[in-house]
């Protein structure tokens, strides 16, 4: 999005173009007056020259839309000053009817100044008009011996002043309305864009980046941030726009009281945060006003949206209402992402063991394999199968078998794995463990620890098993030693598991590509012969 800015400037180009075209009518009228007025002007040549000059500096303004903004900003007020000076010259050269011509011409210039520059233009014109009238009054008295009645001059002069003030007031109101309309349109467009993002995607990052970009475009002089609640309950700055950049903020809790729709702080110097030790960061010391909006769904709080301004009391009610609407859109995006993640987690989670399922393994294995390839990292995979599980089910029933699988999942998740290892239920009585950044030697140690932990676990009814205890067989394969692709790695681990089962169970077998063609594998573990 572009940097729209709340202080939207009204484009004066259409008005300037109309005024420039009307000046050509002034050129014609000036020349006609030079030759038809009676008595003739003091200098007909001067009248024609002033009229031609009026047309000359209007020429570049005919192309005002193609002029650089900087050039137009200089040329427009210069042309207005020229209009006033030429108007004064024509009045002094032509007026001979108690200033009636002067008042009409000055009234037109008053309207022009007020239309182009609103109240400021009207006030500057009135000041210049007063000086010009004094000079014109003196000229008539000194050179022509004609002294107009003061009351008549004051009355007609008051009319010109009134026209200037009315034009300035009407133009200011009209342009203020237009600016506000543009602001409202820009805000409505932002809300529509964010709503579209919410409807199009479940990625919260995409939507929240759009929210931040929109705020930076509408309020480029402010600092904006989104702080999200982390698993530990602390608020951490995740997204930010504006200066200063690169801030790192973390708070123990939200500064917004429960049930408050928005917290507007007119002056941060007079505000006491919930935790006095958690003051605004020193980098924002030059900012005074702040608006803090909660990001929450019906029952879940996600964090806060913050906007700060350097001017005290900078947040008007309509701006706060807009921020509330924007925070509502952001909250919807966060809630949609949360619900999607919950559904996705359910679809990737095994109901019996609460471990990730085979679908999750397929996805995560590809992800970790590509990372290992890209950064030249080792990657290991364990395939685990419960020995003689059919015997256990036939003896104790399937419900007891499910309890064994659930407890085995707890063993994998709690006792035998490092934090980076990821356990899965592959299906039936088979499990898998994905081990990023793990070479085969280290993976073998983990596999042995898993085998020993399972064998030592006091499962209910384990004495009914053929060996007198519940055991597992484990197959191990590692990248880059045992496969050039994710599927190859999975197949190698599965073949190693088959070899472990064939070799007597309760053991760990590492895949050996030299022996794979003959379906024989080197035994790489130490069986536990007695667990009675």
Image (spheres, rainbow, N blue to C red):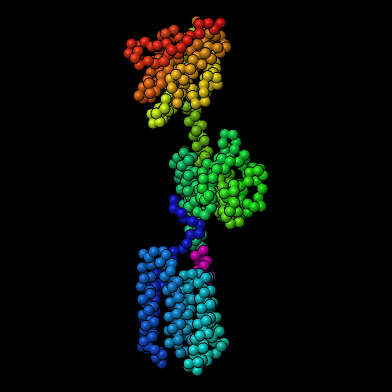
Q: Who is closer to the viewer here, 197 or 484?
A: 484
Image coords of residue 306 (percent x, y): 56, 47
Residue lying furthest left: 517
Q: Who is closer to the viewer here, 352 or 458?
A: 458
Residue 381 falls in which quadrant of the image?
top left
Q: Is residue 132 visible?
A: yes
Image height check: is 204 above or below 27?
above
Residue at figure coordinates x 53%, y 17% from the top left: 408
Q: Classify the position of the C terminus by image quarter.
A: top right
Q: Is residue 297 visible?
A: no
Q: Is residue 213 left or right of residue 33?
A: right
Q: Who is closer to the viewer here, 60 or 277?
A: 277
Residue at figure coordinates x 51%, y 50% from the top left: 242
173 magenta-colored: yes
Residue at figure coordinates x 39%, y 31% from the top left: 374
Residue 36 falls in which quadrant of the image?
bottom left
State which region is magenta. 166-176
Image height check: is 497 above or below 335?
above
Residue at figure coordinates x 48%, y 93% from the top left: 144
356 magenta-colored: no
Q: Main secondary structure of the magenta part?
A: helix
Image coords of residue 370 (percent x, y): 39, 29
Image coords of residue 519 (percent x, y): 35, 11
């Amino acid at each position: 999005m572009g940097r729209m800015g709340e202080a939207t400037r009204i484009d004066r180009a259409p008005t300037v173009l109309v005024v420039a075209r009307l000046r050509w009518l002034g050129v014609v009228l000036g020349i006609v007056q030079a030759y038809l007025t009676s008595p003739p002007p003091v200098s007909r040549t001067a009248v024609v020259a002033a009229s031609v000059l009026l047309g000359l500096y209007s020429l570049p303004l005919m192309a005002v839309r193609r002029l650089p903004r900087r050039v137009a900003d200089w040329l427009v007020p210069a042309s207005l000053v020229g209009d006033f000076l030429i108007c004064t010259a024509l009045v002094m050269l032509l007026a001979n009817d108690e200033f009636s011509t002067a008042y009409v011409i000055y009234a037109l210039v008053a309207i022009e100044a007020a239309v182009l520059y609103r109240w400021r233009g009207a006030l500057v014109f009135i000041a210049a008009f007063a000086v010009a009238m004094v000079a014109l009054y003196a000229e008539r008295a000194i050179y022509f011996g004609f002294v107009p009645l003061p009351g008549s001059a004051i009355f007609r002069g008051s009319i010109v002043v009134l026209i200037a003030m009315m034009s300035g007031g009407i133009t200011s109101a009209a342009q203020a309305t237009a600016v506000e309309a543009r602001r409202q349109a820009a805000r409505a467009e932002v809300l529509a864009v964010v709503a579209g993002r919410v409807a199009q995607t479940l990625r919260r990052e995409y939507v929240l980046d759009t929210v931040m970009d929109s705020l930076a475009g509408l309020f480029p002089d402010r600092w904006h941030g989104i702080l999200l609640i982390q698993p530990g309950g602390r608020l951490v700055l995740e997204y930010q726009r504006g200066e200063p950049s690169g801030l790192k903020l973390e708070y123990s809790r939200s500064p917004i009281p429960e049930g408050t729709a928005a917290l507007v702080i007119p002056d941060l110097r007079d505000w006491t945060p919930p935790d006095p030790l958690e003051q605004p960061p020193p980098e924002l010391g030059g900012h005074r006003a702040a608006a803090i909006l909660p990001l929450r769904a019906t029952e879940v709080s996600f964090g806060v949206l913050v906007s700060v301004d350097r001017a005290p009391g900078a947040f008007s009610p309509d701006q706060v209402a807009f921020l509330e609407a924007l925070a509502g859109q952001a909250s919807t995006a966060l809630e949609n992402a949360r619900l999607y993640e919950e559904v996705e987690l359910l679809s990737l989670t095994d109901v019996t063991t609460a471990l990730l399922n085979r679908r999750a393994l397929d996805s995560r294995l590809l992800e970790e394999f590509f990372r290992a390839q890209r950064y030249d990292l080792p990657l290991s995979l364990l395939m685990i199968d419960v020995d003689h599980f059919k015997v256990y089910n036939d003896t104790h029933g399937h419900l007891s078998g499910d309890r064994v699988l659930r407890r085995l999942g707890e063993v994998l998740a709690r006792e035998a794995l490092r934090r980076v290892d990821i356990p899965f239920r592959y299906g039936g009585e088979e499990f898998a463990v994905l081990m990023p950044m793990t070479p085969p030697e280290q993976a073998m140690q983990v596999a042995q620890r898993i085998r020993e932990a399972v064998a030592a676990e006091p499962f209910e009814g384990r004495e009914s098993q053929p060996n007198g205890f519940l055991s597992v067989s484990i197959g191990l394969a590692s990248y880059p030693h045992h496969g050039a692709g994710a599927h190859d790695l999975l197949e190698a681990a599965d073949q190693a598991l088959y070899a472990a089962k064939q070799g007597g169970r309760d053991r760990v077998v590492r895949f050996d590509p030299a022996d794979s063609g003959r379906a024989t594998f080197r035994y790489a573990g130490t069986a536990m012969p007695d667990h009675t």
